[in-house]
Image (cartoon, rainbow, N blue to C red):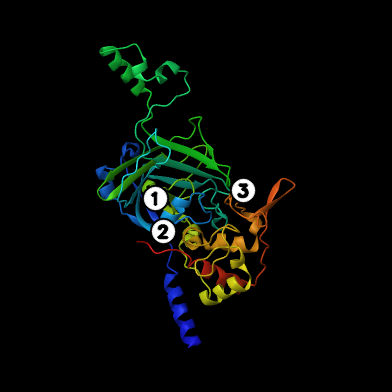
Amino acid sequence: MIKIATALLATTLATSILMADSIVLVKKTDRDVTKLTPESKAWEHVKATTVHLYPQSAITLNDKRANAINRGAKAKEAKVKAIHDDKNIAFLIEWSDGTRSVQRGYKSDEYADGFAVQFPVEYKNPEKLPYIGMGSDDRPVIIHLQKAIEEVYEPNGNGDVSMQQNVLSKNVFGKEAAEYARRVGALAVRDYQRSFVSEGFRSMTEIKDGSEKFYADMEYDANGWRGTLIRPIKDEYLSLKGVFPVAFAIWDGEKLNRDGQKLLSGWIAVKFSDYKGKDELVTVLTAAAKGDVVHGRELIEQNGCTGCHQISGLSGPNYAAPGLDNVGGYSTAAYLRESIVDPNAVVVPGYNRNAHPNTPWYNVVDGIRQSTMPPYPLDEKSLDDMVAYLKTLKSEAK
């Protein structure tokens, strides 16, 4: 009976080790891609690639209601297309969403649908890509964020204090009141798009000097959202050559998604259709995990990993360490391997405030964060087996 159960487990886990998402091919066009919108007809002539986005569960949000709503959240499929014109590159991402959630300036308990596209600044070594979502020390990322918002007036930093008064408190009537409303409307924020550079948790910094030129947009219909991102192929932050990695994130405002409560893809290889060079990055990002999954699970338990990390069915205590559910969906095999043998390579400091003081995720030594997780110098086969098991930790797409 034990042998039968083990065989069934091996079969179940083996079927969950799927190949990573296929590469996104960037179609070349002679037309200016900066004119594209989510509804442009040009997208109909571009092949779509299916990508998967997984609930980010490393850190538990300090919101009981949001955590309850998102408990057991499933992965989501999205379609991605890309076009370039030698100077700029445009992405289209499409995903289903049964509700249109828009951020309103006068609401503090409503959240917007949105999406983000992330690029590593350096990607020559595909075995050393940044931590997904936030980058990591010495491995910065550029993140473009777009959210659905309702037109709202807010102080714009230009000293227009007279325009912050309600029209009813102004001594204006008729045409004067209409003109005042028009002038206030001209100062309104009609779009929410931001660029950030990040080199690890708590380091995300908005680029406000206008040096990062990009444009994003979102359109909603009965099928869900279509979002576009258009940016230069090369600028002072990025140089996208031949083959490069990209990652996507989406937020569902109806489910109180914001900050780290979102769906996140792993690194996905993007390739210009006319590129003829080496495909090492494609190989690393699309290769199936190798190793004995059943033995990997046994090693996870034997080495005490579940004493701190949360894994459904093998759960450790809450907040003692980053949760590992879905880590196989948005983490590369190389990142998981590095995390086992060198936990200090990427330290996640943003643990929940409810964490027990006796279980800190890191200590600060000479001003440098050091993980409290010890390194595990295992033999190559054991590492392969553990990584193979960790790569199975991802929810199904609904």
Where disc 1 sits, the SS reads: helix
The numbered disc on residue 73 is 2
Which amino acid type corresponds to the residue marked 2 in the rendered image?
A: Ala
Where disc 2 sits, the SS reads: loop
Residue 78 position, x and y percent, is 35, 54
Q: Nearer the viewer, mark 2 or mark 3?
A: 2
Asked if the residue under mark 3 is in contact with the one under mark 1, i.e. CB atoms within 8 Å, the reply is no
Seen from the viewer's position, the closer of residues 239 and 174 is: 174
Residue 344 position, x and y percent, is 66, 56
| Residue at the bottom extreme of this rendering | 1
The residue wearing badge 1 is 255
Seen from the viewer's position, the closer of residues 285 and 27 is: 285
Residue 49 position, x and y percent, is 35, 56
Seen from the viewer's position, the closer of residues 185 and 384 is: 185
Q: Is residue 313 left or right of residue 183?
A: right
The numbered disc on residue 137 is 3
Task: Name the N-terminal-most of marks 2 and 3.
Answer: 2
Instruction: Report whether residue 161 is seen.
Output: yes
Residue 151 position, x and y percent, is 34, 31
Q: Is residue 65 above or below residue 189?
A: below
Seen from the viewer's position, the closer of residues 137 and 272 is: 137
Instruction: Report whether residue 86 is seen.
Output: no
Q: Quadrant of residue 127?
A: bottom right
* Pointer 2 local density, CA inside 10 Å: few below 14, some 14–19, many at least 20: some
